[in-house]
Image: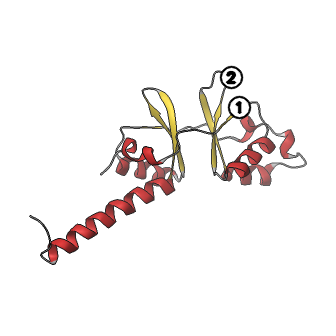
Amino acid sequence: MATVKEIIGDIEKHIISLGVDKTVADAVSILVEHEIGALVVVDSDGKPVGMFTERDVLKCWTRKGDRHFKDIKVSEVMTTNLIIVEADDDLCYVTTIMIKNRIRHLPILEKNKLVAMLSIRDVVKAQVTDLRAENHYLKDYISDKYPG
């Protein structure tokens, strides 16, 4: 099975983040503008301190009371139990983490530096590509077209 590092070449390496002092309205605007489902929330030093996802928007909406999104800080509603994977991690391991924790986005570290965001879509795409290649080779093998 491939590693995260092998598929992040296909992932845009620019991570869209948001400062911890920004509002939910700011976060929603960025999510919509970039057509993404998650943001890394960073402190003033740029260190990741949480994630803000589409699910956090929904949770915020149901619990906001009379408050407007522009009056709610991201830090009040973000996910703080940040799960991060490393670029050398096996894709099977990463898939297990995503399924077990019911998450769709994972920040990726390489040499203790945040380098990319991995989505469940990226994982599925890589696995489908591997399965297609395996299927092709097996069909060739069965039909005696295998060059071996």
Q: Residue furthest left?
A: 148
Q: Residue visible at 53% across and 54% down?
A: 102
Q: Quadrant of residue 40?
A: top right
Residue named by callout 1: 19
x, y percentage for residue 65?
Answer: 87, 49
> Would residue 72 appear left or right of 79 to someone viewing this image?
right
Q: Secondary structure at mark 1?
A: strand
- Please, is residue 119 above or below residue 115 in the view? below
Q: Mark 2 vs mark 1: which is more N-terminal?
A: 1
Which label sits on residue 44? 2
x, y percentage for residue 128?
Answer: 39, 63
Residue type (three-letter) at the residue carrying disc 2: Ser
Asked whether disc 2 touches disc 1, contact meaning CB atoms under 8 Å apart, the reply is yes
Residue type (three-letter) at the residue carrying disc 1: Gly
59 and 4: which is toward the camera: 4
Q: Residue visible at 21% across and 70% down?
A: 138
User: How many numbered marks have been drawn onto this rendered protein structure?
Assistant: 2
- Please, is residue 66 above or below residue 20 in the view? below
72 and 44: which is toward the camera: 44
> Would residue 22 appear left or right of 114 to someone viewing this image?
right
- Please, is residue 59 above or below residue 78 in the view? below
